[in-house]
Amino acid sequence: MSTGGAFGGNRGLRPIPPEKGIFPLDHLHECDAEKKEYLGCLKSSAHKSEQCRHLSKKYLQCRMAKNLMAKQDMAELGFSGVKELDSTEDKNTESIEH
């Protein structure tokens, strides 16, 4: 007879909690705009996440500001070299294109 539990799971092992703990879902849709902007970027860039890192950072900053996750230094989350795009950078790219 098998020593595993239902569906082959081992009932003797204790579950390990997630590294960052639990965090609430965004039930009030407080960061939906940032989420949609990031997902739109992923879709338009053929899911190349590197091109959308600034939006990922913006989304996480929104979640921290709304207390949907613990505040943490962005460098600790892997965003040390990522800066937000501002309007001056957008204007510079527009002037180059025209």
Image (cartoon, rainbow, N blue to C red):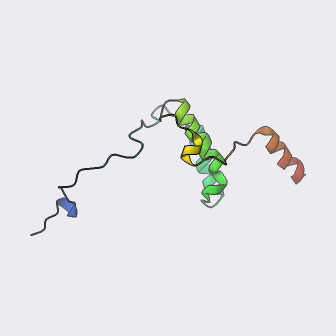
**Residue at figure coordinates x 58%, y 41% from the top left:** 74
- Relative vertical location of residue 15 with respect to residue 65 in this rendering, above or below: below
Give the total number of marks visible in the rendering.
Answer: 0
Specify the quadrant of the image occupied by residue 23.
Answer: top left
Q: Is residue 94 left or right of residue 7?
A: right
Answer whether residue 75 is visible to the viewer in this image: yes
Does 7 sit above or below residue 80? below
Side of 7 where 63 appears, left or right: right
Would you place residue 42 above or below residue 64 in this image? below
Q: Residue at x 87, y 53 (%)?
A: 97
Residue 25: image location, x then y, percent: 43, 37
Q: Nearer the viewer, residue 79 or 42?
A: 79
Residue 70 on image: x %, y %: 47, 34
Q: Can residue 30 be seen here?
A: no
From the top left corner, tell me how far across and down residue 73 is, in percent: 56, 38
The residue located at (53%, 34%) in the rendering is 64
Q: Residue furthest left?
A: 1
Horizontal side of 4 relative to 52 (left or right) equals left
Q: Nearer the viewer, residue 27 or 56?
A: 56
Q: At which x and y percent is residue 87?
A: 79, 38
Quarter the N terminus occupies: bottom left
Residue closest to the far bottom = 1
